[in-house]
């Protein structure tokens, strides 16, 4: 008899886990409280404009493609991609008229490094050499496997494999060993924000993120990131899986430390296994009721953990095409990155801050009305548990005004305030209410040393049989490629236990 698996949540990791398990021969059904797939990888549609709601940059495209190839499908039939070059453009507040394009071509990138800081070029190449060793080690030994015990990481075999590169200290410290230019350090260091942690307290391990971009590039999926979500939904259904939308799970049913189903609308739905893609802290506080099944993750433990930053997003429908803005991805730095990060993670309302502008309709005109563009703007801000200010209309207006006034100084955006025809916004309160993100933290648990690898929540519950977790707050961490790996770990754990 075919065994039944229930997946809680149709986020990226939930969909990927469901596909893997359905392909492996299980009867899988997803229960999703929203009306659409994708979780944070969703879409906002407004007055003919279509915006990716959350993730927007495609890195490590082979991991996106892997889930389709596993099932014998051609990924190009589901998620047609193109590589971007330049990958993105960087603006600095004191020289808004002299932006820097970052190429995925190593020769062109070297010339750019030379133009920014000739004395750092040799150090930059040494950085690539050294951090690449760390990346290969992580790829082979950390990112694709679970860590149930401390000795799974600290053992003789792992020590022998560890590259002779000192991956100690913070990401900023590691980059600073090779680079002196503050501008170049900003261009490289800010990318730890892709997983919601500051380069000034995030482990040096994460200084590999810019290297992955520099060596492998970034990509764009036709239709935007939401195409990936709908493509996974389509594949899952083609394999025979079922998705129940508008199905809000109240509780994971647990009998004698064994998961036996879920409760929806006060009715129990039985299953042999449960895979929870709800945010791990939320799930442990709200869906797992049994103290024994919680194990060490008590409510007090969850409250005391460290959480990633959140984000304020503006979605602006404009009345024209932005031909003078040449790149899809644009980053605007407005002061010392260290001060910016310090303010975010100390909960201060930002007087100055970096932000990001994404114009997907430049590559796919169908995402906006003919002759128009849509602007997606994201500013990292404090999570709700850290912020010493409230999110209200005044706060939204404050950040909106700051962003627009800063953009007016950049060529192509001079009249941005008069060119908006429709708009929407998303705040940490929305991350909390719509996605059950604890404290509105957009990336879940911070990947600090005390919350990484074997110290991070794992896919397999240590305190409850037949219960598994996946998503950004579990090992190996946040970011679309990494949660796709999380799904692979969760599915593998379940299959191994069943066998």
Image (tube, grey):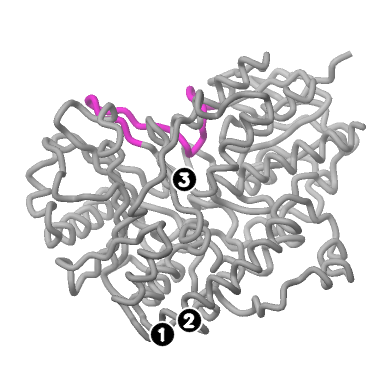
Of residue 125 and residue 209, the one placed in the foreground of this image is 125
Quarter occupied by residue 380: bottom left
Which label is found at residue 259? none
- Find residue 434 and report its horizontal and vertical position in percent: 47, 37
Disc 1 designates what residue? 180
Quarter occupied by residue 162: bottom right
- Find residue 423 and report its horizontal and vertical position in percent: 22, 38
Task: Tell which tag, 1 or 2, sits nearer the viewer.
Answer: 2
Which label is found at residue 123? 2
- Looking at marks 2 and 3 on the same chain, the residue that comes earlier in the sequence is marked by 3
Quadrant location, the N terminus: top right
Does the residue at mark 1 contact the one at mark 2 (Cβ under 8 Å)? yes
| Mark 1, other Cα within 10 Å: few <14 / some 14–19 / many ≥20 | some
Q: CA distance from mark 2 to mark 3?
A: 27 Å
In this view, 230 is above or below 402:
above
Quarter occupied by residue 494: top right
Q: Callout 2: helix, strand or loop?
A: helix
Does the residue at mark 2 contact the one at mark 3 (Cβ under 8 Å)? no
Q: Residue at x 20, y 37 (%)?
A: 373
* Image side of residue 275 versus residue 97, left or right: right
- Looking at marks 1 and 2 on the same chain, the residue that comes earlier in the sequence is marked by 2
Q: Callout 3: helix, strand or loop?
A: loop
Q: Residue at x 67, y 63 (%)?
A: 451
Q: Residue at x 72, y 73 (%)?
A: 163
- Can see residue 106? yes
Disc 3 designates what residue? 58
Q: Residue at x 84, y 69 (%)?
A: 154
Task: Tell which tag, 2 or 3, sits nearer the viewer.
Answer: 2
- Can see residue 392? no
Q: What residue range appears in magenta?
A: 33-51
In this view, 231 is above or below 293:
above
In this view, 382 is above or below 124:
above
């Amino acid at each position: 008899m075919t065994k039944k698996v229930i997946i809680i949540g149709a986020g990226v990791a939930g969909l990927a886990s469901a596909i893997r398990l359905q392909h492996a021969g299980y009867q899988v059904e997803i229960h999703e409280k929203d009306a659409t797939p994708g979780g944070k990888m969703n879409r906002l549609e407004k007055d003919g404009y279509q915006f990716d709601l959350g993730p927007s940059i495609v890195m490590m495209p082979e991991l996106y493609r892997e889930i389709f190839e596993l099932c014998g499908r051609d990924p190009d039939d589901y998620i047609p991609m193109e590589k971007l070059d330049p990958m993105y453009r960087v603006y600095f507040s004191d020289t808004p008229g002299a932006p820097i394009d970052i190429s995925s071509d190593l020769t062109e990138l070297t010339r750019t490094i030379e133009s920014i800081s000739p004395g750092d070029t040799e150090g930059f190449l040494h950085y690539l050499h050294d951090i690449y060793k760390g990346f290969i080690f992580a790829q082979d030994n950390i990112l694709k496997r679970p860590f149930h015990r401390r000795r799974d990481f600290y053992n003789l075999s792992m020590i022998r494999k560890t590259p002779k590169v000192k991956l100690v200290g913070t990401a900023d410290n590691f980059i600073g060993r090779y680079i002196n230019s503050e501008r170049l350090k900003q261009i490289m260091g800010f990318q730890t924000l892709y997983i919601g942690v500051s380069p000034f307290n995030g482990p040096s391990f994460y200084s590999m993120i810019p290297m992955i971009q520099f060596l492998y590039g970034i990509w764009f999926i036709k239709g935007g990131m939401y195409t990936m979500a709908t493509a996974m939904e389509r594949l899952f259904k083609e394999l025979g899986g079922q998705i129940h939308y508008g199905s809000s799970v109240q509780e994971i049913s647990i009998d004698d430390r064994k998961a036996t189903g879920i409760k929806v609308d006060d009715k129990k739905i039985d299953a042999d296994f449960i895979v929870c893609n709800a945010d791990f802290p939320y799930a442990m506080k709200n869906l797992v009721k049994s103290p024994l099944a919680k194990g060490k993750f008590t409510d007090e433990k969850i409250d005391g953990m460290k959480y990633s930053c959140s984000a304020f997003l503006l979605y602006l429908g404009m009345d024209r095409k932005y031909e003078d803005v040449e790149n899809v991805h644009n980053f605007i730095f407005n002061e010392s990155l260290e001060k910016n990060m310090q303010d975010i993670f100390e909960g201060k309302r930002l007087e100055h801050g970096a932000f990001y502008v994404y114009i997907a309709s430049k590559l796919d005109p169908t995402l906006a009305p003919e002759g128009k563009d849509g602007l997606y703007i994201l500013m990292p801000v404090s999570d709700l548990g850290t912020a010493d200010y409230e999110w209200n209309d005044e706060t939204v207006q404050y950040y909106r005004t700051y962003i627009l006034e800063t953009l007016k100084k950049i060529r192509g955006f001079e009249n941005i305030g008069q060119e908006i025809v429709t708009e929407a916004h998303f705040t940490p309160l929305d991350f909390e209410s719509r996605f059950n993100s604890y404290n509105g933290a957009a990336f879940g648990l911070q990947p600090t040393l005390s919350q990484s690898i074997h110290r991070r929540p794992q896919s397999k519950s240590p305190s409850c049989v037949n219960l598994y977790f996946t998503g950004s707050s579990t090992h190996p961490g946040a970011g679309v490629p990494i949660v796709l790996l999380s799904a692979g770990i969760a599915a593998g754990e379940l299959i191994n236990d069943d066998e």
